[in-house]
Image: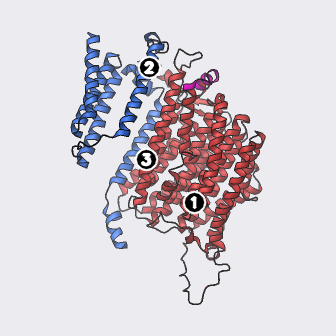
Chain colours: A red, B blue
Amino acid sequence: MNWSHFFALTATHQWGSIFPEICLVVLALSLLIIDVLGGRRIDRRLVARVAITGQLLLVLVAFTALIGTDDRLDRETFSGMLVHSQFGQIMRFFFLVSSVLVTYLGGIFLKKNPLPGTEFHAIWLLVTAALMLLAQSNHFVMLFVALETVTVGFYVLVSYNRNLSNGLAAGLKYLILGGVSTAILLMGIALLYGIAESSGLENSARNALKFDELGKFLEFNSDNSIARTGVLLVVAGIAFKIGAVPFQIWIPDVYQGAPTPVTAALAVSSKAGGFAVLVALVSGPFRPMADLLVPVLSAIAMATILFGNIAALTMRNVKRLMGLSGVSHAGYLLIGVVAMFAIPEARNAIVFYLVTYLLATFSVFGVMAHVSEGGRDDIQPIDVYRNLSRENPFLGGVLALGLASLAGIPPLAGFVGKFLLFYAAFKAQLYGLLGVAVIGVVLSIYYYFGWIKEATFRDWKLSRLEDEPSPRPKVWPELGLAGKIILGGLALLILLLGLYPGPLSSLSQY
Amino acid sequence: MVDFLFYLFSLTTLLAAGTVILTRNPINAAMLLILTFVGTGALFVLLGAYFLAAVQLAVYAGAVIVLFLFIVMLLDVETARSGKPNYPGLVAGIGVGALLVAGALVLYKRGDYFTLATLRESVPVGASTRSFGVELFTTYMLPVQLAGVLLLIAMLGVIHIGKRTRDSSGEEASHRQ
């Protein structure tokens, strides 16, 4: 084969278009090199600092790119593997911001636990790069490889605290169940590929793994039973990633056993990755399957909202509580996905909800990472937070704002997110789903405010008996300047987006 | 000649696969599983899918079986005693097998999807090593690169979780107690 033929085949490989992803991989590799060259002489925190600085630079670059690149959008690169759309750009930025916050939480975690840190930061950077590619994938091969890179990274990160038997058990559970879900997803992709390229059918596709060609095939063959099975299996594989019923069974144990920053990453980045894929599929190739997917996704959404909220009611471990409440948030987001079949603009509501979910979840996990003790990261009972607000008003305030935003209390960002989602569902006439969602929100107020009550009002009216010894005063952690800026910034953004949601909702309008 | 070879390798594969289930020695079972994979690989060669045959031998007969043998040896599994057979497993196996045979029969009876003509028409990517390689390094360049990242993650993870460090697990843990 001569070179001109090779260049013709690779003409669409525009490596500049995935500049942020390449930078992340290079950053991860340089962290490893710093570790190898420096050995024991270097400060343990140097690696974390380099990781955060590099990512902050990337966030700046990506933000300037996000504001002004309309001419470079809506084109395919890498022979159709990737598509660059506004939605993909926003999700890329989302994953980058989430990555910076997880790296920051990881630094706190590693300070308290005697574990090597370089591998954590390097693996997390690589996982973020894969997530960013996942959000832009336009081809099932790309989607599968990116999703597997993310999942394999999470297998390692979940069991990162290998001195903890619960952490290893969580990693093993995630490995086995993740393997099963990958097999289901792959079976679905294989069925779709096989049926869409079989020349015995009309309108068979030539390159069925590409999203748009598969969509064209499904438009004409939406009642083919093999195609329907394939679509269902693919959706089931993604449902595992977002933690929707009946694939939510891994969530409490894995969330509890994983290190706190990894739990935050699972709750935000992994879930958002699943939704990015689901939104791309539903707005693209699976759109003709509405008669199948609308009832199925509606049933999943209802079961997910009810299960997540009811199961979270009795949880006393805050990591399990956040996991199960995250299940219910996946349910609310699924309502938006169902609404997308009727009104495609529901995608904006999903993006806005994901952003508010990121802000609120990271402010809660930020407080959790500071309050948790070193060593037993898996045991974080709600009692630890007793009187947090009175003795450390800053941490208590951030926690209360984050939890209230997750519950959807009016002046905060979470309320606007829920309002936009429910409004989209109302316009799509999904009244049954709306009813279930409202019940779910009411239930969620109980456990979110139970936590706030524990932190704020616990000893309000309980007069202590005379002979009872007063509990030893708890030493709350000292926040550094970076911690104050990050947590305060998150809380401020929650308030600002609640009062003035304009800038973000205009950003996601297209 | 091809017919004779087909029957020879099919018979080898079937006999070896049957013995894998029936033998009580796990080492023998693993060895016979290699024979099964080799037989399947030979069938791929007869179909003209040389690359697939090579992958079958390298990955399954090579890597997967070595992994099996490692586990058998590490766990020191003794020869299974002749107890009562695993009835649920038996029923499930027969059920799945019956479904597979039924599916093959249905396809054979219909014969319109997968006649030789339609199969020849669309030469799959993996059929020849050359077209496979060209596709990998042109169309599928980005997924291949990303697979490299995946392997890097796996390597880092294995090193981190498998490594026994004195400063993290041993000494500090005993200091704390």
Dot 1 amino acid type: Leu
Q: Are marks 3 and 1 in contact (CB under 8 Å)?
A: no
Report whether A369 appears left or right of B145.
right
Residue A446 visible in rendering: yes
Tell me where residue A341 appears, x and y as whole percent.
Answer: 70, 35
According to the image, label 3 marks what residue?
A: A175
- Please, which chain is the residue tagged with disc 1 on? A
Residue, far front: B84
According to the image, label 2 marks what residue?
A: B124
SS state under label 3: helix
Magenta region: A213-226
- Front residue of this view, candidates B165 and A375: A375
- Front residue of this view, candidates A504 and A23: A504
Report whether A181 appears left or right of A211.
left
- Please, which chain is the residue tagged with disc 2 on? B
SS state under label 1: helix
